[in-house]
Amino acid sequence: MKRLKANHIVAGYDKKIIIDGIDITIPDNKISVIIGANACGKSTLLKTLARLIKPNSGELLLDGKKISEIPPKQLAQILGLLPQSPVVPEGITVADLVARGRFPYQSFLKGLSAKDYEAVEEALEIMGITDLANRCVDELSGGQRQRVWIAMALAQQTDILLLDEPTTYLDITYQVEILDLLTDLNRKRGTTIVMVLHDINLSARYADHIFALHKGKLVAQGAPSEIITEELIKKVFNLDCSVIKDPVSGSPFIVPKGRHHVKLNAS
Amino acid sequence: MKLSKKLLLIIISFFSLALCVLASLAFGARFVSFNEVLNTLIHSRMTTINEIVVHERIPRTVFGIIAGGAFGVSGALMQSITRNPIADPSILGVNTGATLFVVGGIAFLGINSPEEYIFLALIGAAITAVFVYGIGSMGPGGATPIKLALAGAAISAALSSLVSAIIMPREQVMNAVRFWQVGSISGATWEGIVTVLPFLIIGLLLGLIVTPALDALAMGDDIATGLGVRVGTVRLIGAMSGVLLCGAITALAGPIGFVGLMVPHTMRLICGPNLRWIVPMSALGGAILLTLSDVLGRLIGSPGELEVGIVTAFIGAPILIMIAIRAKGRTL
C-alpha cells in the first residue's frame, strides 16, 4: 500500500500557479528525490506535500485520509519535515533543539518523558552527534548544524520524512555524509524519504525513485537507471550532456556539455 | 542550564522578592522598621499609626507584584511571537492603544473610575493589537516578525500624537492623566486589583497553554507546522494573552515601560531559550523589578515619591544598552 498520495495538485503563491496538476504517489520505504530546473516547482511540490502550502485544488491523502482532516499533531507523528532555512534559537544546546522534535508527543505543559529522552538519545546517536549534545548550536559548523536539524526530525519518529534541499550550502564532503546518513536511516528503519536535491548525479546515486519536474508538470518518474537519459536532461534542464555509468555506484552519471572544452576526437 | 542551577535561581528569586516586599511595606514617607512590619503582618493589628501605614502599603505592594509579573510574562510572549528579542508589549501598540482610549474616555466621556478605565484600556489595547496584526499580515508571507515590529512602531507613533492632541488643549484632562501617562502603582486599591484579576488570570492561562507551541514556533513557521503546530492560532492566542496581561495592568497603572522588555531578555540570557523556563521566571523577575523600582522611587523622591514608570525607565535604559552590547559580543 502507498501511504502518501497527491491527486491532481494545483498550487502556488498568491494567484501565481507554480505546480499545475501533478499526480504523485510516494513509494513507501524508499528514497525519492524530486529534481528539476530552478523555478520548476520542485520545492513547491515538497512544501505542498508537507502541508506548508495549501493547494488551490486537488487532494492530498495519507493512508487514504485527506491530510487537511487529520489533526496536526497526529499528522506530525507520521509525516516529518525539514524545511530549507530553519531558525536556530539563540543559545540553544544541541540536546534541547533535538528534544523540540518531540513536540507532537507532548501534552499540555508536561515535561519530557523517559520515552522522549530515549528518542532524543537515539536520534543523536544515529546522526553521530552524541558528543555534541551539550554544545551550543550557534557554535557548530554548517555540516554539524544540518546533522542536528536532521536529528530533530528523527526525534519526531515519523515514518515519512520530507527534506527540502538538505545538502544546499554544504561542502561536498558533508553532502555525501548527510546523504549516507539518510540512506542508513532508510535502510535500517525503513523510513520513507522524499527530498529535493540540486545535484543530479548525487540524486541518481542515492535515489530509489526520481520525480522529474518541468514547468510545474511531472514529466518522468522511475528508477534513476531507467529514466535518466540525455533526452530527459535536455528536456528538464535544457542541457546537452552525455550519460555515462558512475564508476563508483553504477548509477547513471551525467557529464554536461558546454560550448568549450570539447575534445577534438569526441564523437 | 543544569537543574541545580535552576533551583538555585528560583530560591534566590523568591528570597529577593520577599526582601522587596518587606522593603515595600517598610519604606515611604514614614519609615517602619522591618521588625515592626513582620509583627504587623503576623498579628494583623491596626492600632498604631505604623501598623496602619503598613496595612495601607499592602495593596500597592500586591499590585506591584502582580503588575510586574504580568508585564514580564506579556513581554516574554510578545518577544517570542514577533521573534524579536527586543520587542516589548508596546511593540503591538498595546500600551499606546490603551492610553489613547483611556485619555479619550477621560476627555470626552468624563470617565474617572478604575472599572471604567480597564474596559476602555482593554478595548483600546485589543483593537490596536488587531489593527497592527492586520497591517503586519498584509502582503506575502503573512505576519512576519519584521512587519509586525514595523507596523507596531508606526501605529504607536501615530497614536501617541493623537494622545498628545487630546491632552494638550485640555488642562483638567492633563492633570487627571499626568500620573497615568508616566505609570504609577501608588494609587492601587483592592477594588482595582479585584477588577483586573479575572483578565490577568485568563491572560496567564492562555499564555501557558501556548508556551510549548511558541517554543516550536521559535524555529520558524515551517518547522513549527511540521511539528503539528497551528501557527496562526497559536500566534493569535499568544497575542491575546499578551494584550490581556499588559492592557489590564496599563488600565490601572498607566504605561510602565521597560519591565516587559528587560526581564524576559535577562531571563533568556540566564536560563537559555526554553520558554517553559523563561515565562515563569519572567513573572518572578518582573515582580521583583517592579516592586524594587517602586521602593526606589519612594526613597529617591522622598519626602514625596518618583513614579515607578520613571524609575523603570532609568534602570531599564542602561541595562538594555548593556544587554545589547553583550549580546552583540556573543554573536560576533
Image (cartoon, rainbow, N blue to C red):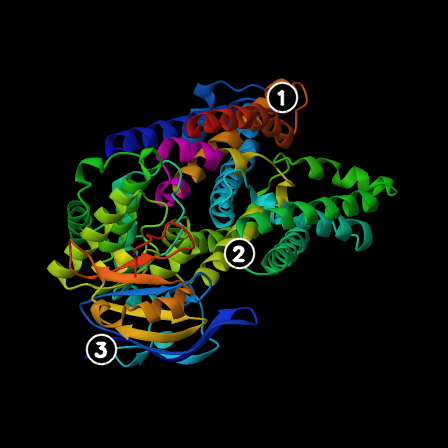
Q: Is residue B269 magenta?
A: yes
Q: Determine which residue is flagged by label 2.
A: B240
Quadrant of residue B184 in the image?
Answer: top right
SS of the residue at dot 1? loop
Of residues B102 and A127, the one drawn nearer to the viewer in this rendering: A127
Q: Above or below — where is A77 with respect to A217? A: above
Q: Residue furthest front?
A: A265
**Horizontal placement of A153 versus B66: left or right?**
left
Q: Determine which residue is flagged by label 3.
A: A2
Q: Determine which residue is flagged by label 1.
A: B29
SS of the residue at dot 3? loop
Q: Residue at 42% across / 70% down in the picture? A: A214
Q: Amino acid at mark 2?
A: Met
Q: Is residue B139 magenta?
A: no
Inter-mark Cα distance, 3 to 1: 78 Å
**Horizontal placement of B134 versus A260: left or right?**
right
SS of the residue at dot 2? helix
